[in-house]
Amino acid sequence: MATLTQVDERIAAKHLLTHPFYLAWTAGTLPRESLVEYARQYYAFEANLPRFLTAIHSRSENTRVRATLLANAWDEEHGETNHAELWLRFAEALGLSRTDVQHAAMGGATRTLVDTYWAAALEAPVEGGIAALYAYESQLPAVSASKMEGLGRHYGIAGDGVRFFEVHRAIDVHHAAAERRMLVEASATNGDAIVEWTGRALDAWWNFLDAFPANARSAA
């Protein structure tokens, strides 16, 4: 289990909740303009996530892996309350229009994040792509719970405006557990790729968050 130990250590070292952006969000000191721009930029990742999942799915020779990834993609994209839709409702609660979010130009760090996940989905070994997913989704239950609390306490956003986070607080417990099982099975044969793509995904997420000023002085 050395591979999964390395994965866990890398995630702990770059856990999203330890980034200055999220520390400020939790404390209520994150400038609202940073929160608004984050909502605009994150949509590019969220809108592409089902495609990352189905791209990895299409490359796997393992029927159980394909079924698991397809179920994850279904959770993301089906129905009137699909996850991209829920993100738009969060953006609207911040005062943004749907058009502004859906057609926002990607910043450089956003482009790097999206490109990293496309590379994980299309170019990395399948196990590396799953590791990139796990590096993020394993953190989402705790991150979502923290976001919900901060939004309600400091920014006056609740109800439908936090439904995206409410859903991910629960559903990614299951997504991450399934991804971890796949990584355990693959670790003996492709451990290096698993560790590499965990790190690449975490670096891309930290770079993405670095783009948003975490205090009023840096936002000025």
Image (tube, rainbow, N blue to C red):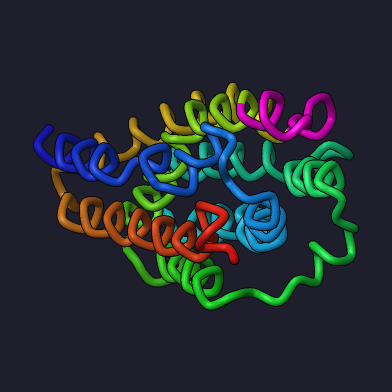
Image quarter of residue 34: bottom right
Residue 101 visible, this angle: yes
Q: Is residue 155 above or below residue 47?
A: above
Q: Give the residue at x 39% y 57%.
A: 206
Q: Give the residue at x 68% y 60%.
A: 37
Q: Give the residue at x 22% y 45%.
A: 10
Foreground residue among 35 and 120: 35
Q: Does the magenta stretch include residue 153?
A: yes
Q: Is residue 207 above or below residue 31?
A: below
Left or right: 116 in relation to 91 = left
Q: In this view, does 102 lie above or below 35?
A: below
Left or right: 138 in relation to 171 = left
Magenta-drawn stretch, dominant element (helix, strand or loop): helix
Residue lying furthest left in this view?
Answer: 2
Where does residue 39 sit, x and y in percent of width and height?
69, 54
Q: In this view, does 54 lie above or below 8?
A: below
Q: Give the residue at x 19% y 39%.
A: 9
The magenta segment: 150-163
How many tags in the picture?
Answer: 0
Left or right: 73 in relation to 146 = right
Foreground residue among 203 and 35: 35
Quadrant of the frame with the C terminus: bottom right
Quadrant of the frame with the N terminus: top left
Where does residue 180 sit, x and y in percent of width and height?
34, 33
Foreground residue among 119 and 13: 13
Residue 50 visible, this angle: no
Where does residue 203 sit, x and y in percent of width and height?
33, 60
Q: Does the magenta stretch include residue 36?
A: no
Where does residue 93 sit, x and y in percent of width and height?
84, 41
